[in-house]
Amino acid sequence: MKIPSHGSPKANRPGWFGPFGGRFVPETLIEPLRELEAAYAAARRDPRFKAELGHELATFVGRPTPLTFAGRLSQELGLRVWLKREDLTHTGAHKINNTVGQVLLARRMGKKRVIAETGAGQHGVAAAAAAARAGLPCVVYMGTDDMARQAPNVARMRMMGATVVAVDSGSRTLKDATSEALRAWSSDSRETFYVLGSALGPHPYPTMVRDFQTVIGVEARAQILKEEKRLPREVIACVGGGSNAIGIFTAFLKDKSVALTGVEAGGTGMAPGRHAARFAGGFPGVLHGTRTYLLQDANGQVLPTHSISAGLDYPAVGPEHAELRRIGRARYVHASDKDALAAAHELCRLEGILPALESSHAIAYLIKARKRFKKDGVVLVNLSGRGDKDLGTLCP
Amino acid sequence: MPVSLARALSDRRASGRAGFVPFLVAGDPSYAGSLRAARALIAAGADILEVGVPFSDPVADGPAIQAAGQRALAKGMTLKKAAGLVKELRRGGATIPVVLFTYLNPILRMGTKQFARLCSSSGVSAVLIVDLPIEESTATEGELARYGIESVALASPTTTDRRLAKIGRASGTAVYYVSREGVTGVRKGLAPNLAQRISHVKKMTGKPLMVGFGVAEPSQARKLAPYADGVVVGSALVLAGASGAGDVSRLAKRLVKALEI
């Protein structure tokens, strides 16, 4: 038995990002993943698939999303802050970019139904919406704790015809919902397409989800060049699994002058179980099919996590982020529950924009770290989703 | 030193029955309780014992083994203590091969070298890592082989022929065949065409098969006995264990009887 380590020759294999990634799944899922990998590779090369996806993004999702200059926030911080408005997509978060792509692929593969996991419910709603449009039955696995704190999204999924399955095992959040979705997929992979919601999980998901989300950065880069005639100093995004972050980072990877910052959930403190800052408190390990930074105890058991935002409340980070950090291309920080809540209120007050609690972590970091930036420095924040779902938490 | 998995299975077949391969979760309902259950299973006629190491996120397991793992973790079970359980069985005179059935992450956290040493010093005969497919484990005889410990590879209903051959080469002396899609658990009946599939997988891998996932009742074991070299029973024994080692023993004896050919 040889486990890939730093500098392993496996670094260049598909599905690996340096020493991170891979396909660590039970044997029953190997063939379904290979089938998916092949189907996705073929779809990517097919101009018709590309055209169909582009058409869906334009006419159903509402792309391109605008880039908004946050004038009053900029004034307060002494910066030039631009917001990439993924909150304005259909269903209210960047998740729809990915589900539209995966559901098109599911249809292409002739699958009869789709399943998904969800934390905050944004991916679940986006999967339900894409499935409804495609006429495919949809089952969404969701932790019972998350169902309680994101009740409006549960209602939305049901209205769109999805079946929401309550997952009451383990920590009753995204981690356990993901385990349950993987179990369901392994029971019926011939008919079922698993729409995984973040740049996580076994290969090809981290690559495929990144590809579907890259549209965010491609648009934002062109938009900011048009508005500012220059690139931003820094691009900031919150990181749960990390799909919105990888989606905006990817277009800027080659622009070495642009700093890339991912913001994890700092929760209520750095003690185990009180946060979801994988890079601050984790070690490389394997969960849900991928090798990446993972919050775990000394015996290799996965630790419970906490975040006020259900979408960041997950013990592992997308493997490509682990690699971007290893090579020093991106840095990862964390923002606390308290700062994220304050940031949400601040953005409402100053800009008339209600951000999701997940995205509020990116704003919170920006406010806290404002002294890092040169005066009038251009900063781009990915506003990954809107906060209507969080009203219960924001205004109790 | 215990014999190889293949040898244990072929010796049993020569004596007129299929191998009985019971599974239990180390530390469920407690360390002492699982030790009692293991001894009861061996006394009832186990030919190979599978000791499950509990993991916080067992994606291949159904409700019974998930719950058993949670109970064991709550009582402080670890990979190291699970190996300790095997060591105690050996000290008590157990000579049948013992397979440690585990997820990958606890091994990574411990370090593969240290894990192999631990297995060796504890009398573990073989290791099955349920979320480590052959591509990620590499064909190189790694740390485990250095200590003479078998790696058991899995094959499933979805595994292609080309892969079955690779799995046969990568696995130790036997292969674990997952008899149906999905997760572990108690189910009625057997997967359709299972007999045919078993002989095909045996041919392609060139190794004897331990067949598991979904086998719970003596009637299922009886049907499998003519084809499978070994029959793995997990969830049903774990559920029986809830009411003590006595029930484990009674079910094990009925299963052993059913495996006679």
Image: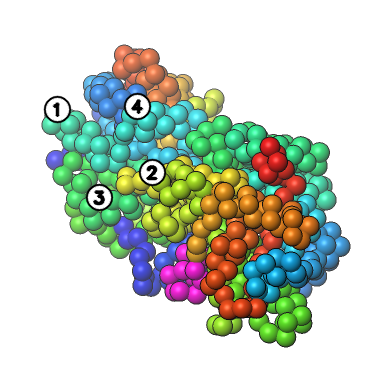
- Residue A100, position in %: x, y? 75, 57
Q: Which residue, as the protein is rendered here, is positioned at the far bottom?
A: A229
Quadrant of the rendered image containing residue B233: top left
Q: Is residue B197 at all visible to an observer of this figure?
A: no
Residue A330 in the magenta stretch? The answer is yes
Residue at numbered disc 1: B92
Q: Are marks 1 and 3 on the same chain?
A: yes
Residue at numbered disc 3: B115
Residue A395 in the magenta stretch? The answer is no
Chain to which the residue tagged by mark 1 belongs: B
Cα gap from disc 4 to disc 3, whole angstroms? 22 Å
Vertical placement of residue A344 versus A320, above or below: above
Label 3 CA crowd tier, 10 Å (few <14, some 14–19, many 20+): many
Please name which of the two marks, 2 or 1, marks the residue nearer to the observer.
2
- Residue B203, position in %: x, y? 42, 49
Cα gap from disc 1 to disc 4, whole angstroms? 20 Å
Query: In the image, is B14 to the left or to the right of A106?
Result: left
Q: Which residues are magenta?
A: A319-331
